[in-house]
Image: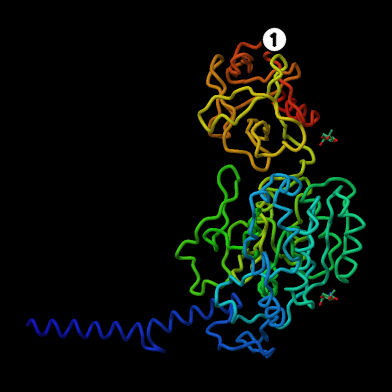
Amino acid sequence: MKRKQKRFLQMTLLFAVTLIFLPNIGLWSLYREKHLVKSAILGEQQAFPMGIGDGQLYPWTDGLKRKDWHDYESIQKDAMRSGKGEQGKPYPLTEEDHDDSAYRENGFNIFVSNNIALERSLPDIRHPNCKHKVYLEKLPNTSIIIPFHNEGWTSLLRTIHSIINRTPDSLIAEIILVDDFSDREHLKEKLEEYMARFAKVRIVRTKKREGLIRTRLLGASIAKGEVLTFLDSHCEVNVNWLPPLLNQIALNHKTIVCPMIDVIDHNHFGYEAQAGDAMRGAFDWEMYYKRIPIPPELQRTDPSDPFESPVMAGGLFAVNRKWFWELGGYDPGLEIWGGEQYEISFKVWMCGGGMFDVPCSRVGHIYRKYVPYKVPSGTSLARIRNVAANLCVDSKHGGTGTELRLDICVKDGSERTWSHEQLFTFGWREDIRPGEPLHTRKFCFDAISHSSPVTLYDCHGMKGNQHWSYRKDKTLFHPVSSSCVDCNPAEKKIFMNRCDPLSETQQWIFEHINMTVLEKFNSKKTSS
Ligand SMILES: *[C@@H]1O[C@H](CO)[C@@H](O)[C@H](O)[C@H]1NC(C)=O
Ligand SMILES: *[C@@H]1O[C@H](CO)[C@@H](O)[C@H](O)[C@H]1NC(C)=O
């Protein structure tokens, strides 16, 4: 009896193993077939023989020819370079090199940028499988559109050199530099003279400050390539970055593709992958962009294959030109940046398209320490100064839960950066937050009653205690408690009080705000 049972178990086990592993009838073959179908859709080569790179064409099951697009000559040239910052290594900084003035005009260390080669080499940090991928022999060409505003000289030039050096010439229809009304001298004639050496570079300029989105739209409107590829003006493209993007679009034109965005450190210009590397795009309830891990059920067997992402990061992507315009391009009412990626992402999905991140395409980007430019118009205010005290509201005394205080007003000019604590944003949620519009911290002015202190508290975006309006009589009014912000200059305290427009301690001057915008904002509120 016992032996019979054991035998039965052995047979079952053997059968199960057969089912899983037998090459052509087992579950394994089912899995493999499914996988092949999937990878044919994705257009990625599967189990490809090693040792390619001979310019040979490889027929594929869909009848389309593919080839190895690597430029081995350029790869070899890069490999031989040595020097400071080469191979994407951090520049060896001394104490003085950290001087804040190096960051002031660009938001990153321009001294380091000026001291590393324009044609510096980067490490190939792609997944090893990328080395063996082949892409369609016939790929569409692309207009590469690079908007800029007061970009640093060497950071802009390095962007262009990296593109020229690491992109097959046949795929570049043109490189369009779109100047959003810069006033820095080096971006005028000097730039035109320099770029004259590159036959494919065109420079166009806006007639007034337009912000990133209308600047991109201007570039897109004059582009002639089959695909539009948008990049930033402080990027470095990595080895064989473009063919995998164009390949994905060639297979299905209703596709937006994004490269992996690597980090070029704003201090030392070291090049590395973002934390976590391949992740999906997402956003929170406040529309802040986030990256979240790819759930296991959506992970590809080959982690170097393109994967779908709900929303893109924004700055760097490629899209079929005709389809971009079919989607309506961008909403031209968008100012600066920070919302456009949602607009375009939602339209892609709603119009039957798809969005992919492509691990074999990598582009480095300098994430700035702070935003060095002024925003064109809108709701930012540099500081809130009290008339009686001649002191400013200051948020440096702490984070969420702390009381706002008065402090000596920081000087105008270079201090207007989000690293300082006297800059506030009066946003569309009708709350007030420390920081630049693009980098506000997530606390808001908050008051719980007509006599409480004004504190900083986690923003909830639901008005109530965090709902403010600035009135013509210079009072800062809190509708929910029907009271006004008052202060005690001697103790530097800020608190709520019964409104008294004649009291100078209740009068606040919003400096650097566009009054037209603020008035429009307030009139909208009173009428609704
Ligand atoms: C880009 O490709 C299109 C279609 O093949 C072609 O008509 C056009 O001349 C190409 N542009 C450049 C600059 O190669
Ligand atoms: C304020 O904003 C309005 C509307 O956006 C604009 O027309 C005006 O030129 C701006 N004023 C200043 C001083 O920037």
Q: Where is residue 147, by image quadrant?
A: bottom right
Asked whether, in this view, residue 65 is left or right of residue 461, the answer is right
Left or right: residue 98 versus residue 221 is: left
Image quadrant containing the N terminus? bottom left
Q: Which amino acid does label 1 sit on?
A: Ser
Q: Quadrant of residue 433?
A: top right
Query: Could you tell me which residue is drawn at 79 percent across and 78 percent down?
Result: 170
**Vertical placement of 354 versus 36: above or below?**
above
- Residue 376 falls in image quadrant: top right
Q: Residue at x 56, y 51 (%)?
A: 290
Quadrant of the frame with the C terminus: top right
Q: What element carries label 1?
A: loop
Please name the residue shown 45% across and 65% down the image. Answer: 297
Residue 275, x across and y down, in percent: 53, 58
Can you identify the residue that label 1 sits on? 503
Residue 419: x, y in percent? 65, 39
